[in-house]
Image (cartoon, rainbow, N blue to C red):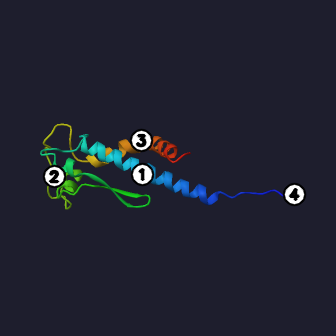
Amino acid sequence: MGTIIIDNTNKILMNIDKVKDKALSLAVGDITTIVKTGGRTPRLTGRMMAATRPNKVSQGHYQVIIPVVYATYQERGMRADGSHRVRKYTTAGTGKGFLQAALDTVGRNFNNLIRNAARMEGF
């Protein structure tokens, strides 16, 4: 009588991809929430915050989209050519790097997001 080895490698690899996708989905959702609920996001009219949304490009690839013409200008704090710097933001405590600050906040918590995603996928 021989030994039977059951190879579940493909199943495990598929589940790892699901966990990765779920963790990134959670991260993009958290980044979007931080940008929409304030954080350091400039908010004279709130249009930029309201327009922010997550977008799934493909499996394991996500974006945070802010479809407002001046969003990049506000994030950098200056024009792309460096010709004009934002000197004063409309709301105290807001300013350039608002999206990077949200990324950094979520990045510090990414291990927990991976654990939560693994639990959601049955690990």
Marks 4, 3: nearer the viewer:
4
> How packed is label 4: few (under 14 Cα within 10 Å), some, or many (20 or more)?
few
Task: Provide the residue designation for mark 3.
Answer: 108
Residue 24 — which label? 1
Q: Amino acid at mark 3?
A: Arg
Q: Position of residue 87 (x, y in %)?
A: 14, 46
Q: Is residue 82 left or right of residue 28?
A: left
Dots 4, 2 in contact, CB < 8 A: no
Residue with the mark numbered 4: 1
Q: Are marks 1 and 3 in contact (CB under 8 Å)?
A: no
Q: Is residue 114 left or right of residue 90?
A: right
What residue type is disc 2 on? Arg
Q: Residue at x 41, y 41 (%)?
A: 108
- Alpha-carbon distance for marks 4 and 3? 52 Å
As measured in the structure, the alpha-carbon distance from the residue carrying label 4 to the one carrying label 1 is: 46 Å
**Nearer mark to the viewer, of 2 and 3:** 3
Q: Residue at x 16, y 52 (%)?
A: 85
Q: Earlier in the sequence, mark 4 or mark 2?
A: 4
> Could you say whether the residue bearing mark 2 is in a helix, strand or loop?
loop
In the rendered structure, which amino acid carries the disc numbered 4? Met
Q: Is residue 88 left or right of residue 8?
A: left
10 or 41: nearer the viewer: 10
Label 4 secondary element: loop
Q: Measured from the top left, where is residue 6 in percent x and y?
A: 71, 57
Check if mark 4's residue and mark 3's residue have beta carbons within 8 Å. no
Label 3 residue SS: helix
Q: Quadrant of the C terminus?
A: top right
Of pointers 1 and 3, the one earlier in the residue sequence: 1
